[in-house]
Image (cartoon, rainbow, N blue to C red):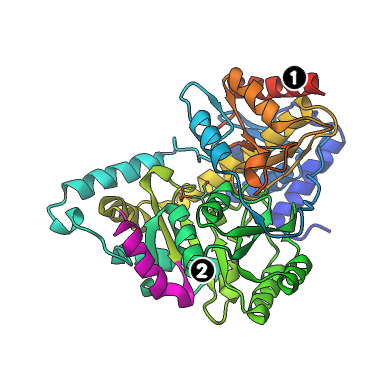
């Protein structure tokens, strides 16, 4: 039985679609029409439409309204990874450099780099705040913002951590050059060359490169495409190998997009305590969930300061600002010192502008708009993949962020597809980047942050044709 008002409305519309009142491709009544017809608020209608979108019954088209979806066969999620269960040296850097430089070319149809949509009005507002900070007569803006970083920015970050279930004081936050620097500093604080670090599988290639450059070894833990790493496998691994730390992205990971359920996060926090292991928690996509509430961080269950939370504004605002941070618990002093010797400080002006924006710029409104845009783009992305990619393709359906992980059918080779697509000026990220030893040869990652247009839809069709030919 439907419980809430919006669920009752959604159920009524579902029935109407079932009775053929609205057929695939038909436009549904506008939100304004429904609002006055049903005597409810616009947000209730939007919630009802949101639920029907989640169920892929309807889709929103920018500036046009809501339409009944064409019934397509939805591809299932990728299978669970089964990595080799022993620590490995990492060899991804050469390939990462080649791919990262190539996918950024300006005339490319971009599905490759994990860039957010930077055409939002919020970005203009941040730039104006940056210009204002540059014009400020305050000498301080021209000086070093020595670690831990600008106090007003640390205050804003500590305030926002409350939504993630964390009680962090501004004095526990260190500003870094993006999340990447935060991850590297945390790794250096808890592990040394030759040490083994447990990671999810597939894993963000920035973490792999960091492990490689620090001379550490990576141990891939089997990872469920919807729920994250296997805790049983992690526990077993700690009994077999001298693991020094774990690095995980439990909220909308890159590239899997999974969100670890809360009970599992809590169980993981207890396992870390039992095994006396530190965790580097990458929460970069945590504010981009499509659901009603922001996911809690594992750090919110941390009782003794072993979780080092890392994030930045790279995916919610823009990566060029290079404003990131870590809240590293008991490792604070070590990381503060490492930050000083590594880069002295993070640039001052972007810190001033981001602090100003977080306080006065309407960040939450911006996030709400990006989330619904990304959710809409995800649905269209999955529909296009279902329509154009060969049978047997599997794809994730992330509940946050803007990255889809695609498992290609048969013996399709991601590197061959990558090169063929590049020749047609289409960028994708090939799967081998996400494993220490270049596995995932039949996977690719697709970025769906940008709104769909004819060119982007045709590019997916072309990728599908290349794949069909390859098979
Ligand atoms: C999971 C993850 N962590 C960290 C980073 C690096 O972020 P930043 O640009 O803030 O250094 C990225 C960038 O793509 C990422 O996807």
Name the main secondary structure of what is drawn in magenta.
Answer: helix
Q: Is residue 249 above or below residue 56?
A: below
Residue 349 position in % (x across, y down) = 26, 51
- Quarter of the figure with the C terminus: top right
Q: Is mark 2 within 8 Å of ligand 1?
A: no
Q: Quadrant of residue 160?
A: bottom left
Q: Is mark 1 within 8 Å of ligand 1?
A: no
Q: Is residue 343 above or below residue 170?
A: above
Q: Nearer the viewer, residue 86 or 271?
A: 86
Which class describes the residues within 10 Å of circle 1: few (<14), some (14-19), or many (20+)? some
Region in magenta: 327-346
- Quarter of the figure with the N terminus: bottom right
Q: Is residue 195 shown in magenta?
A: no
Query: Secondary structure beneath disc 1?
Result: helix
From where the camera sits, is residue 33 visible? Answer: no
Q: Residue furthest front?
A: 194
Q: Quadrant of residue 302?
A: bottom right
The residue positioned 78% from the left and 22% from the top of the image is 470
Residue 77 position in % (x across, y down) = 79, 45
Asked whether disc 2 touches disc 1, contact meaning CB atoms under 8 Å apart, the reply is no
Q: Quadrant of residue 419?
A: top right
The residue positioned 82% from the left and 33% from the top of the image is 409
Q: Is residue 281 above or below residue 92?
A: below
Q: Nearer the viewer, residue 226 or 356?
A: 226
Q: Nearer the viewer, residue 348 or 67?
A: 348
Q: Is residue 298 left or right of 391 when viewed as pictured?
A: left
Q: Is residue 107 left or right of 230 when viewed as pictured?
A: left
Q: Work out how far the residue at label 2 is from the one at label 1, CA to CA, in angstroms.
A: 44 Å
**Which label sits on residue 308?**
2
Query: Secondary structure beneath disc 2?
Result: strand
Residue of label 1: 465
The residue positioned 68% from the left and 60% from the top of the image is 87
């Amino acid at each position: 039985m439907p419980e809430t008002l919006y669920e009752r409305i959604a159920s009524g519309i579902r029935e109407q679609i079932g009775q053929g009142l609205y057929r695939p491709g038909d436009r549904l009544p506008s939100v304004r029409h429904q609002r006055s017809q049903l005597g409810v608020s616009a947000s209730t209608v939007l919630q009802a439409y949101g639920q029907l979108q989640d169920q892929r019954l309807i889709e929103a088209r920018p500036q046009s309204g809501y339409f009944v979806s064409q019934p397509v066969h939805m591809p299932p999620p990728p299978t669970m990874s089964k990595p080799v269960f022993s620590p490995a040296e990492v060899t991804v850097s050469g390939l990462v450099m080649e791919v990262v430089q190539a996918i950024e070319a300006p005339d490319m149809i971009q599905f490759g780099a994990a860039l957010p949509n930077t055409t939002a009005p919020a970005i203009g507002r941040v730039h104006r705040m940056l210009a204002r900070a540059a014009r400020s007569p305050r000498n301080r803006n021209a000086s070093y913002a020595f670690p831990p970083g600008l106090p007003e920015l640390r205050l804003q970050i500590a305030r926002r951590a409350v939504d993630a279930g964390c009680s962090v004081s501004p004095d526990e936050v260190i500003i870094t050059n993006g999340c990447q620097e935060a991850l590297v500093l945390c790794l250096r604080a808890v592990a040394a060359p030759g040490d083994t670090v447990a990671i999810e599988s597939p894993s963000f290639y920035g973490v792999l490169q960091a492990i490689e450059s620090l001379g550490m070894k990576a141990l891939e833990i089997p990872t469920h495409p919807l729920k994250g790493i296997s805790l049983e496998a992690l526990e077993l691994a700690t009994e077999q190998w001298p693991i020094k730390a774990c690095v995980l992205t439990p909220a909308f990971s890159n590239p899997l997009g999974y969100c670890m359920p809360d009970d599992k996060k809590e169980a993981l926090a207890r396992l870390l305590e039992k095994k006396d292991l530190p965790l580097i928690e990458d929460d970069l996509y945590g504010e981009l969930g499509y659901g009603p509430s922001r996911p809690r961080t594992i750090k919110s269950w941390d009782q003794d300061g072993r979780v080092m939370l890392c994030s930045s504004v790279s995916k919610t605002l823009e990566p060029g600002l290079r404003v990131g941070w870590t809240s590293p618990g008991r490792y604070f002093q070590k990381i503060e010192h490492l930050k000083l010797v590594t880069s002295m400080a993070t640039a001052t002006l972007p810190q001033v502008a981001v602090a100003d924006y977080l306080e006065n710029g309407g960040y939450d409104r911006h996030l709400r708009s990006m989330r619904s845009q990304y959710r809409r783009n995800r649905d269209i992305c999955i529909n296009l993949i279902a329509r154009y990619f060969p049978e047997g393709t599997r794809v994730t359906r992330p509940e946050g962020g803007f990255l889809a992980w695609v498992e290609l059918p048969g013996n399709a080779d991601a590197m061959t597809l990558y090169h063929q697509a590049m020749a047609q000026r289409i960028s994708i990220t090939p799967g081998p980047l996400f494993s220490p030893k270049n596995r995932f040869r039949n996977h690719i990652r697709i970025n769906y942050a940008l709104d769909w247009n004819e060119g982007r839809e045709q590019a997916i069709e072309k990728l599908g044709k290349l794949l069909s030919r390859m098979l």
